[in-house]
Image (cartoon, coloured by chain):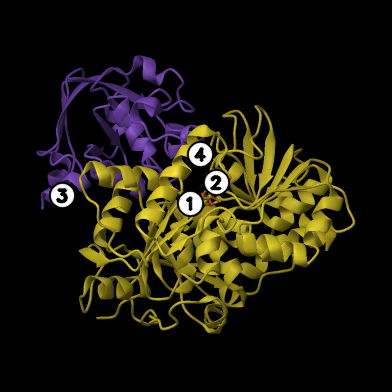
Chain colours: A purple, B yellow
Amino acid sequence: MSKAHVYKRDHINTDEIIPARYLNTDDAKELAVHCMEDLDAGFIEKCAAGDVVVAGDDFGCGSSREHAVWAIQGAQVGAIIAQSFARIFYRNCINCGFYVVELPGAIEKINDGDEIEIDYEKGVIENKTQGTKLEFKALPDFAIEIINNGGLLKHISRK
Amino acid sequence: MPMNMTEKILAKAAGKDAVCAGDLISAEIDVIMCHDVTTPPAISMLKENGIDKVFDPERIVVTPDHFQPAKDIKSAELHKRLDKWAREKKIKHYYPIGKAGVCHALLPEQGHIRPGEVIVGGDSHTCTYGAFGAFSTGIGSTDLAAAIATGQLWFKVPESMKFVLNGTLPPGVYSKDVILAVIARIGTDGALYRAMEFTGSALGDMTMEARMTVTNMAIEAGAKNGIIGFDETTKQYLDEHLKDKTEYTVYDSDAEAEYVAVKEFDCSKLEPMVALPHLPSGGVPIGECSGKEMDQAYIGSCTNGRIEDLRIAAKIMQGKAVAIRTIVVPATPEIWKQMMDEGLGSIFYEAGCVVSAPTCGACLGGFMGILASDEKCVSTTNRNFVGRMGSPKSEVYLASPATAAASAIEGKLTDPRKFM
Ligand code: SF4
């Protein structure tokens, strides 16, 4: 089970997720220390392994820096649930073997601190705190296959 | 089946007769752009996965730009990794420091962009190259690694939106004002996952430099790509700049092609625009924000660091002095030289500006002009997110080179028409 950290905001961008002043490294552990720093300086302290970030529309807009995904992965975030995602960020997540869940109305349906469980292949989120089941459109099979293979490069080197 | 330009290019790249929006395709890549932030991680990933292959060393263009010249030890290490790889793999078009420039200004200038091709780059503003009638989009490091190794990537064919830019731009109003007005109308996710196709008389009047400012900011509306049809202006630019290979295929949108939306703009009525913090969609006419005091002006970047932009700024600054810190960054060495040859460098010097070497620098809050807390900067760049140019407590106001130059002189947001 994972705890939800809800940001009731749209357009959370890659500059907020990992500011450019830290882009002089590509080490996920180093990046993780600054994950979400310009949005919520206390994030890394309160995020436990497997926790989930929930946000509004257009999550991950801005730069193509995959460092944003690495910082989130380095911080051991389990998944991101957003009402919608920016294109390059969304693609980068799948390529890095990281789950993204598109859930309309996410910030109304999940409260900060709720305990949730996600079935990615079936497309169901169980909100244990509220006792609700939230359905979402599961990723296409090929994307799930990339994620299960550990990302795009592992996926193509297996072929 | 009628198709638009984006669909035609993707169909060709996928080896199909036709594609439509929503199709998943595997496309052959013509050109890959690599820079110093996103490419070194891609190189490491390739190594870790035991992939040694580069699909074609002649179709990869490499330039350090974000932190060049190296701003600190860590970025020097990135440059070292990039340099070693480019030499090892015998990358034909490698632009080391001295030749290096801001990627999206450098590639067209050096003749690497051709109509009808599929171009990807490890940078979100790769959509800039769509000004030449190419399909061009930004990707992350993993996609970049896959593209470098295989020369192919999967894409979902985007839905297209058409933007008709009618009328003629009034004096003091530039292509930057047009794109800020477009994004202000549709929002930062107004074209999410879609292609933005631009057309219309105001666009036809624009130089290639000015058109690149428009497609550069397509990503700021969430778009996958921005695209502009081929005309005499495109042809002339290509005749002057293409080096290796001059043949290319031109695709036009069919008259009955499908668009999910068509938006018309009367450019004759536009005013100089300023995008207020903290979103590129925060554009308002200068009249609604003039007088706001600034601490810095920044003229440069892949949006507005080309020679035409520097000429516009210099014309306003000639014989005057700036009232605030003003940083001018020619985007490539060629632009830098042209600026000096045309005497613009002296105008900037005499006005009290500092002129830097080509770099992305402060555009992304890297170095060479970082903002302190509570500082405000009027900038010709493309993003004004929280902390984009420095302190998370600073503010960035996006504007044209003319508005930035006029504001530099007055020390506050100023209508450039005052100086015309
Ligand atoms: S100039 Fe700015 S926006 Fe353009 S590529 Fe460099 S950092 Fe990105």
- Estimate the x, y position of residue B161 in percent, counting from the top left: 40, 65
Task: In the rendered structure, find residue B76 and report the number of the disc placed on it.
Answer: 4
Q: Residue at x 66, y 66 (%)?
A: B269
* Residue corresponding to mark 1: B220
Circle 2 is placed at which residue position?
B383
Q: Are marks 1 and 2 on the same chain?
A: yes
Return the disc, 1 or 2, that comes first in the chain's sequence.
1
Residue at x 38%, y 35% (from the top left corner) = A26
Q: Nearer the viewer, mark 4 or mark 2?
A: 4
> Pointer 3: what residue?
A157
Q: Chain of mark 2?
A: B
> Tag 1, which secondary structure?
helix
- Letter of the chain that mark 4 sits on in the rendering: B
> Is B66 placed above or below A39 here?
below
Classify 10 Å Cα crowding around label 2: few (below 14), some (14-19), many (20 and above): many
Q: Nearer the viewer, residue B103 or B118?
A: B103
Q: Quadrant of residue A46?
A: top left
In contact (CB < 8 Å): disc 4 and disc 1? no
